[in-house]
Each structure stands twice: as C-alpha cells, then as structure tokens.
Amino acid sequence: MNGAEAVRVEDVSFRYTDRDVLQHVSFSLKVGDMLGLVGPNGSGKSTLLRLMVGLLPLRRGKVYWFGQPLASFRERWRIGYVPQRAGSFMSGFPATVEEVVQMGLVGKAGLLRPLGRQGRERALAALEEVGMADFFRWTIGALSGGQQQRVLIARALVADPDILILDEPTVGVDHEAEERFYDLLHRLHRERSLTIIMVSHDLGVISHHMDTIACLNHELLYFGPSDQFLLRQDEVVEAMYGAGVRVVKPALSSCAGQP
Amino acid sequence: MMELFWQYSFVRYAFLAGLLIGFIAPLVGSFVVVRRISIIADALAHVSLSGIALGFLLGSLWPLAGQVRPTYYGLFFAIAASLAIEKLRQTYRHFADLAIPIILSTGVGLGVVLIGLSRGVNIDLLGLLFGNILAVTPADLWRVVILGAVVLSVLALFYKELLAISFDEEAARVAGLPIGFLQALFSAMVAVVVMTAIQLVGILLVSALITIPVAAALRLAKSFRQLLLFSVLLAEMSVLLGLWVSFQLNLATGGTIVLASVLLFLGVLFWTRWREGVMA
C-alpha cells in the first residue's frame, strides 16, 4: 500500500465574499506520509482542510482521495477526522465516552444497521489504543481537555481509517498532554501505517514531529520534507509571517536531525 | 379517581392520550434540547395555528376541503415550517437562532389574519391555545397511536445517525452521513410530535412538554440513553400528576400538566444541588 497516493489537491482556490483565502494550492501525499500543515492565523489552512473533507463547497480546483474525486468518494470512513478540541459541543452533552466513540462507526455501518455488541467491542478496542479504556463509562464533559482529545482520536480510529486528519489538536492542551499526544500519533503511524495530516500554527513543533511540511499563507509557500525545510526556512518564514520573524533555532536544528 | 376512570370513557381517552404523548414528546425533545433548538417546538406550534385556521377557512368556503380535518392542515404547515427553519439555519450559520423567530412571527401573523378572515366559523381558539384533552375522541386517540408509532419507528431506525449529528454535525458530515435527509426527517418528526401534543396542552404550552422533562433529566443523566429514559419517566409523571390534580381540583388540564412538569423540574434541580453540596 505504501507508495500509493492517499490524497491529491489540484489547483484549489477559495474566495469568501470579499477576499481570496486560498490561491492555486496543489500538492499530493502518499500513503504513510505525515503532513504538518502550518501557517499563521487566517492563512487559510483550516479552510483548505475543510475543503478537502467536504465541509466547504469546492468550487475551484479538485481534490482526490485514494484516486477518486471528492464528490464521488463514498468510502468516507477511510478518513478519520479529529476537530479542534475547543468545540463547545462537548461541554454538558450527556453522552458517555463509549457513546461518543461509537459515533465514529455510524458512517461505516450504514443507515438502518444497529451497531450492537460489535460496536461496543470496537469502541473499547479504540479506547484501549489511546489509553482511555478505563474511562469507558465516564460522561465526556467530565474529562480533562487532553483526555477529551484522546476520546475524539479514538472516535476517528474506531472505523479503522487509512488517514487521520487533525485540526489544531493541541490547542489549549498542557505541555505534558501534548507530549503524550505526539507519542500516540507516532505509535499510530508506526503500527497502523496511517497517513496523517495535522493542521497547526506551531511551526517549530510540527517540523519536529512530521516528515512533510506544507507552509501556507493563502498560497503554498513550501511543500516538501521537513529536514530540507531548514535550507529555505528564513525565506519561507518571512513570506508567511513577515520580515523580522524567525523560528527559534533549537527547535528546527533538532528537527533537521530527525529521520 | 379510579371510579372516574372506569365510569367515563373521555377520562380513559385523556389518560391514554396523555401517556402516549408523554412518551414520544420527551424522546424527540431530548434531541431538540441537545441540538440547542429548544424554542423550535414553540415556533412550530404557532405556525400550526395558521395551518389550522386555513383548514377552517377552506372548510367554510368549500365543503370538499372541509373533509380534511384542520389539524392535518396544521401538521402540513408545521412540517413545512420545520424544513424552512433548517434551511434558514444553514443560510444564517452564525445567527442560526434567527431562523426560529422569523418563522414563529410569520406563523402567528398568518394565523391571526386567517382567523380574522374566518369570521363566522366556529373555531375553538381557547382549546387550540391551551389544549383540551378531555375532548379526545377515539379517532383522536388512534391518530396519536399511529403518529406515535411512526415517530418511535423513525427514532429507532435512525437513532445512531440522529445522535451523531446532534453531537458533532461536522464530523458526521465528514463521515459521509446524509445530513440534509436526516435533518429534514428530524424536523418533520418534531412537527408531528408538536401537532400531536397540541391536543394535550395547547399551542402555548406544547414546547414545555417537549423541553421541561428533558431539562430536568439533563441534571440526572450520565449518558444519552439515560437522558431518554429519565425524560420519559419525568414526562409521564407530569402527565399523571397533572391529570390527577386537575380532576381533583377542577383545574385546566393542559396548564396543570405543565405546572406538574415544572414542579418536578424544580424538585430535580434542588435535589441535585443538595447532592452536589453533600458530595463537595
């Protein structure tokens, strides 16, 4: 499977009523790639992600998942989606961790098919994978931010996807939880050969953990291996954030040494 | 009380209709509340008024149109309004709550104009506004049974999808669920429940029956299944208590049922606060 194309974005542009948010963005990822999509606030990275998964209407350009155009791609369960944890939908919602994780199976199971005992077992297995099996019966709102994040990752994993998409997953999570999160991500990538796309504004951390980097500020300023990013970092960072901004060296130096 | 029950068929019909509505209203209400569109029941009830008024008006003008009960015109209007609310919610994503007052005002405006035009037609306006469960006929009861069965079947068949879109609509969309179809189905179901419940508590109080037992159950439930269970239990207790008190003290039945649900809600609120205080 490795080497096959997971996703291809072709000349995607997007315009809100009065301004261009994305201009002619093109790139492709192979199965097993780990992409960090970075850019400042308002650079269009979340818009690109939302266009790719069909949350915004794709009017200009094309997106292909596993060789199929987005509009006719029916095996949506192959995409595991983890939204920003800061979503207010979880606070106070009367659902247990088990119920939330089982929601990840709904698309794959199909209409009119109950999840049954198998759904319960798969939810438990997904929770074990993210180290949250002990919280099976807890109400989702009673968990800490980092724990909720893990539950949402379990929900994305439960349908056994080929690709995991995470939108700013570590926002509002403390440093220790962030470290654990990246450990988990690397393990999932290793054990499941998952393709991973992660949106973040933290260039230093992303370039340390991901093997491919896409720098976006309305247009794609850099797309390539993270270890080669070092050679062009000053030029790209200046185009992204403006003159006078530099990435803190130690983070990038260490990233350059990563395999 | 039991004597009344066995002696008068209208009392039996009232109890049966009350218990059936007390079962389906909070089930649908649970989804309505967690989707944060509690006020939708109120809007649909008001819109149904204009449908009912139109039914009476058409019936007075053309006897053939009068063959269809005005309630069905109300149901049709409520379903159309619920679909319009979903559409407006999509259009005004950042001001989604705007959809409901727009539709509610349209419904009331149209209803008042149509009632004005139906002068001379005998409309039981008080019964519509405040409910008249004691006027439930066997035909009404059958209607409640059939509509209730439809609502229960839809809920059972689409439970997992409705829960998924209520919790996180975006993730459900990414997963490829037919969001438009599910939302339309849910809206139509709310409209059916509202129309069914109007007979019990009337247009002005219908949203209370759909949301107050759920509000109380929210304080107790640790899971969505528990929310459904507790809200049904609380709604059924409200219906029984309300009917009993209203018979004993000769009070308006619809209002008494709603007050009973408020009383239970307050009881749950105080009990959970007291328990939290003890645990702290």
Image: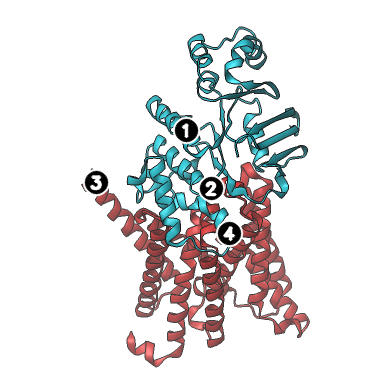
Chain colours: A cyan, B red
Measured in 3D between alpha carbons, the distance from the residue under mark 4 to the one under mark 3, in whole angstroms, is: 45 Å
Q: Hey, which quadrant is residue A196 in on the image?
A: top right
Query: Mark 2 or mark 4: which is in front?
Result: 4
Circle count: 4
Label 1 or label 4, whichever comes before in sequence order: 4
Circles 1 and 2 on the same subunit: no
Which residue lies under the disc numbered 4?
A: A110
Circles 4 and 3 on the same subunit: no
Q: Residue at x 51, y 67 (%)?
A: B156
Amino acid type of the residue tagged 3 in the rendering: Gly
Q: Residue at x 50, y 65 (%)?
A: B205
| Residue B60 to residue A77: above or below | below
Amino acid type of the residue tagged 2 in the rendering: Asp
The residue carrying pointer 3 sits among few (fewer than 14), some (14 to 19) or many (20 or more) residues within 10 Å by Cα, namely few
Instruction: Give SS at disc 2.
Output: loop
Which residue lies under the disc numbered 3?
A: B277
